[in-house]
């Protein structure tokens, strides 16, 4: 039954029977291993990036003159 929905349910049940916190522990490990930081870790960086994006989005379109 490997690779089927029934097999996955059976494996999940076995993991939970061994350790009721099995999936919680795996999820916690993944969260602790994150090293990217991101905007939540640095609000000042988020402010600067937002300002840059705002300036770019407000630029006027450059008219290309095909006759020139």
Image (cartoon, grey):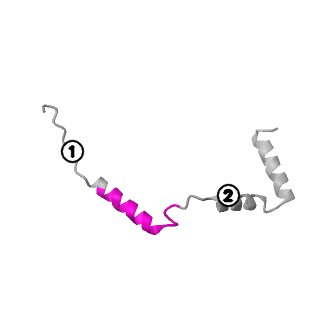
Residue placed most toward the observer, 44 or 18: 44
Residue extending farthest to the left is 68
Q: Which mark is residue 62?
A: 1
**Residue 34, quarter of the rendered image:** bottom right
Q: Which residues are magenta?
A: 38-55
The quarter of the image holding the N terminus is top right
Q: Residue 65: x percent and y percent? A: 16, 36
| Residue 32 located left or right of residue 21 | left
- Residue 5's label in the rendered image is none
Mark found first going from the N terminus, 1 or 2: 2
* Number of marks in the rendered image: 2
Location of the C terminus (image quadrant): top left
The residue depicted at 26 percent of the width and 55 percent of the height is: 58
Magenta stretch: helix, strand or loop mostly:
helix
Q: Is residue 32 above or below residue 59?
A: below
Secondary structure state at the residue bearing disc 1: loop
Residue drawn at x 82%, y 47% is: 10
Please indicate whether residue 11 sits to the left or right of residue 56 in the image.
right
Q: Is 43 within the magenta?
A: yes
Q: Which residue corresponds to mark 2?
A: 30
Whole-percent x, y for residue 61 in the image: 23, 46
In the rendered image, residue 66, in percent from the top left (x then y), is placed at: 16, 32
Vertical side of 11 occupied by 27: above or below:
below
Q: x and y percent of residue 52 in the render?
A: 34, 58
**Looking at the image, which residue is at 38% across and 63% down?**
48
Q: Residue furthest top?
A: 67
């Amino acid at each position: 039954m490997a690779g089927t929905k029934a097999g996955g349910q059976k494996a999940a049940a076995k993991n939970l029977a061994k350790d009721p916190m099995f999936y919680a522990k795996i999820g916690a490990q993944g969260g602790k291993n994150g090293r990217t930081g991101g905007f939540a870790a640095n609000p000042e960086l988020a402010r600067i990036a937002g300002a840059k994006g705002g300036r770019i989005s407000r630029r006027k379109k450059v008219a290309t003159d095909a006759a020139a």
